């Protein structure tokens, strides 16, 4: 009976110890009443940041890397009327030096020399009397946009009836963006005595792109003359261009040797239609109406010529 009694005592002792341990664990680990403030979670967890009240935040006490930055503003526009003129000059009464005061330094290429040969008309015409005439109207210039040498020639030569024309040489100076002042000389060529003239004229573009040439002449023996020429290019398409042209000549005194009377001597109106195969080469066709006036018409009648004439034209306009 002693072994049985010992085994039963050992079992009772084991049960008592297990009950005691379980009661101790239940009392120490009560999650409902656990005090987390006393728990040490270890050094791996960073401390919680201080609470921030955004509603009562004082932004003036915040420390930045540098001083406060002002909001960027657009540069102020120059005062009205203070900008320089189109030629770069400063406005009247201003101390600035035109565009230089705004940091703009334009570089114009007015001093670069160039040249051009242009024949506005080069062809033939046939009038109602069946006469064929060679016609030309061309110019050559060399120089800059401001100053240049200008040589012009215009005239016609009839089959078996002589010729009439002129050659002019000018110094041409730009006095505005659209107008040139011309000083030079003219020499009449063709049938009859040659005449020499001093010449002064102006050439440019009127409103609506009307090209105008006006030249006054003074010759020997008190001779004076005035020549007018105006034309306009009407673009029907980018290549098809219609050009009306008006010319007139006036003389201060008669010159019977050349069949010229005083006053309005002669005038012509022509219409040309050209097609620009390229900008440099354009064939044309047209019609012209010429008329002599006053004493010049009487000189023509005495010589057996017509006072007025209508002719068909064909030729080419070219430049290089």
Image: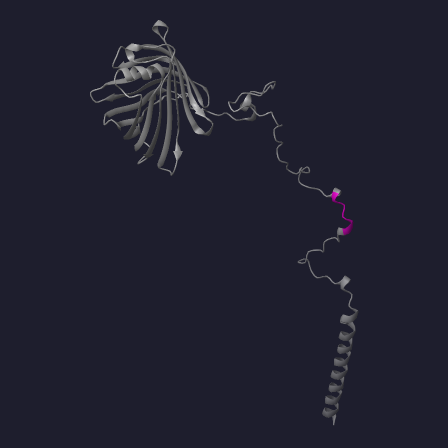
Q: What's the magenta region?
A: 55-59
Residue drawn 72% across the image and 43% down it: 62
Residue drawn 79% across the image and 69% down it: 33
Residue 112 in which image quadrant = top left
Q: Main secondary structure of the magenta part?
A: helix
Measuring from the top left, give residue 15's x and y in whole percent: 75, 84
Q: Quadrant of the C terminus?
A: top left
Measuring from the top left, give residue 121's x and y in whole percent: 30, 26
Using the rendered image of the protein, determine whether residue 281 is visible from the camera's viewpoint. no
Q: Quadrant of the N terminus?
A: bottom right
Using the rendered image of the protein, determine whether residue 140 is visible from the camera's viewpoint. yes
Q: Nearer the viewer, residue 96 or 130?
A: 130
Q: Residue furthest top?
A: 221
Tell me: residue 45, above or below residue 91: below
Residue drawn 29% across the image and 12% down it: 258
Residue 56 in the magenta stretch? The answer is: yes
């Amino acid at each position: 009976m002693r072994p049985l009694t010992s085994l039963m005592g050992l079992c009772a002792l084991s049960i008592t110890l297990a009950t005691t341990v379980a009661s101790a664990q239940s009392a120490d680990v009560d999650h409902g009443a656990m005090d987390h403030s006393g728990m040490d979670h270890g050094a791996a967890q960073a401390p919680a940041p201080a609470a921030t009240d955004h509603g009562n935040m004082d932004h003036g006490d915040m420390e930045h890397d540098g001083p406060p930055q002002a909001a960027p503003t657009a540069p102020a526009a120059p005062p009205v009327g203070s900008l320089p003129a189109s030629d770069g000059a400063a406005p009247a009464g201003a101390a600035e030096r035109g565009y230089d005061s705004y940091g703009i330094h334009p570089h114009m290429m007015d001093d670069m020399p160039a040249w051009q040969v242009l024949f506005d008309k080069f062809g033939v015409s046939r009038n109602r009397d069946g006469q064929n005439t060679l016609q030309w109207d061309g110019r050559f210039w060399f120089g800059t946009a401001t100053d240049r040498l200008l040589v012009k020639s215009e005239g016609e030569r009839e089959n078996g009836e002589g010729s009439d024309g002129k050659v002019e040489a000018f110094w041409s100076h730009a006095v505005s963006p659209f107008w040139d002042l011309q000083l030079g000389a003219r020499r009449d060529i063709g049938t009859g005595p040659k005449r020499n003239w001093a010449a002064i004229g102006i050439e440019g573009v009127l409103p609506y792109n009307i090209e105008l040439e006006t030249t006054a002449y003074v010759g020997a023996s008190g001779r004076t003359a005035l020549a007018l020429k105006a034309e306009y290019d009407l673009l029907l398409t980018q290549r098809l261009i219609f050009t009306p042209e008006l010319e007139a000549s006036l003389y201060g005194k008669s010159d019977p040797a050349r069949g010229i009377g005083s006053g309005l001597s002669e005038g012509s109106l022509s219409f040309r239609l050209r097609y620009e195969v390229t900008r440099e080469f354009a064939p044309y066709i047209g019609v012209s109406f010429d008329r002599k006036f006053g004493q010049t018409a009487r000189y023509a009648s005495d010589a057996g010529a017509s006072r007025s004439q209508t002719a068909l034209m064909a030729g080419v306009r070219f430049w290089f």
